[in-house]
Image (spheres, rainbow, N blue to C red):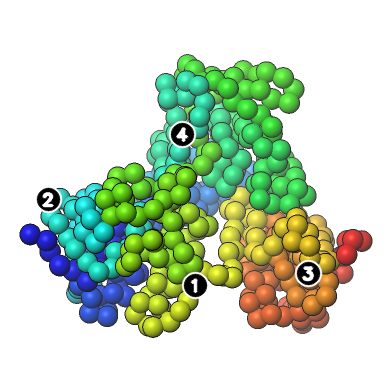
Amino acid sequence: MNEQLDAIILGSGQGGKPLAVALSDAGKKTAVIESKHVGGTCINEGCTPTKTMLASARVAYLARRGGDYGVKTGRVSVEMARVRERKRAVVGSFRTRSEKRLESAKNVELIRGQGRFTGPKTVAVNGRELTAEWIFIDTGQRSSIPDVEGIRDVPILDNVSVMELGELPEHLVILGGGYVGLEFGQMFRRFGSRVTLIHRGEQLLEAEDADVAAEVKKILEEDGIEVLLQANTTRASGAVTLEVEAQSGMRVIKGSHLLAATGRVPNTDALHLEAAGIERDGRGFVRVNERLETNVEGVYALGDVNGGPAFTHISYDDYRIVKSNLLGGAKRTTRGRFVPYTLFIDPQLGRVGLTETEARRQGKKIRVAAMPMSYVARALETDETRGLMKIVVDAETEEILGAAVLGIEGGEIMSQIQIAMMGGLKYTALAEATLAHPTLAEALNNVFSHWRDEA
């Protein structure tokens, strides 16, 4: 016999978990079905553990730089088991709080298991049949395995298993030059591993402007990472032996560990979406409209599984859209929302709005303000001068269209620019503001004194 509920949520990520609490507060009887960990990718396998480990890597980096500041230090070594223990503790605390929040919600039942559709409004789990008028899919993504001959016969790490290493890799080889590959590459280099990063594209971070990507590559190489661009891995064998068609010709690269960071796939294959008639795109992501509705009435998809920008804050905004519309009678959509993000290499890359390339492709008349971080007093004082700031301005309205801040606390500076963009401020509001000295924010005065010739 079917159990009738008001709502079923498949997955408990940064969209599904707060939605469950909101539905509970609205008196809706809700089941949350979770096949793995409460909290989703972010707190279990993504943001929380990686940033915790990156903090350890930065301490190692600064310790080795002690002499630059007149501080004498001894030999620096890293205990990977201790780094892992610290990461596990932080993740555990986040996960426990999330679980307790769900378990304390009076109208919510947390069900551990793999849910699957048996009809448009029916989900089976652990021998039970649940029916609801509202169903929300929030099952996220997982790492994909690159299409390389022999790679399934080679020990391969992904973003989850690489964080469980108890010993430092002697030579970590990374396939992929996106966010995951760059963050882990710099992290393990700072821990003490030799790192080789192999990327098929012409530049790292393919969505970024070429000058920003080039500066990122320069920083990684300064840290001792070997970066191979336009490099096609044709075969994998042995412990870790890769045959790579590089710009210099065919190379054989031997490493101790291999990390695959070439992309992610949606967790939709076990949901039996076809039983409910729910459409997926060619990559397996659940198709949704700008209100996050699938083609089946009453069924929604939130977060990474719907193929939108795969960021925690976007998943959370998906929750806010659905909550406002279903519980608040609003008509919110994803149209025109800001998609800021920060790449947590060191220095950070904060990005919001249009790149210069995108703005020109759209035929906009623009001005570009750009300067190196070595022009920023606070960066000089802290000896953290690597990187650049770049802001794209509409030449006619003088409003800010986008920005990239590659520098110390680049994500924080980018967020200040985003706030100005949200308020529709002209760039002059920042250029002429009285900002405290010496702060990193003060760079927002100075950058607009450095316009490029083109307009």
Relative height, residue 5 to residue 356 (above, below): below
Circle 3: residue type: Val
**Residue 314's x, y, as percent?**
49, 64
Q: Nearer the viewer, residue 369 or 407?
A: 369
Mark 3, secondary structure of its residue: strand
Pointer 1 residue: 333
Kindly identify which numbered label has been placed on residue 127: 2
Q: Quadrant of residue 302?
A: bottom left
Pointer 4 residue: 145
Circle 2: residue type: Gly
Instruction: Count neighbours of disc 1 (C-alpha within 10 A) and say few if under 14, some if 14 to 19, many if 20 or more.
Output: some
Pointer 3 residue: 393
**Residue 356's x, y, as percent?**
76, 58
Q: What's the residue at 80%, 57% (across, down)? A: 372
Please tell me which of labels 4 and 1 falls first in the chain: 4
Q: Quadrant of residue 162?
A: top left
Q: Nearer the viewer, residue 310 or 43?
A: 310
Mark 2, secondary structure of its residue: loop
Q: Is the residue under label 1 in contact with that under label 4 (CB below 8 Å)? A: no
Circle 4: residue type: Ile
Please tell me which of labels 1 and 2 falls first in the chain: 2
Instruction: Count neighbours of disc 2 (C-alpha within 10 A) and say few if under 14, some if 14 to 19, many if 20 or more.
Output: few
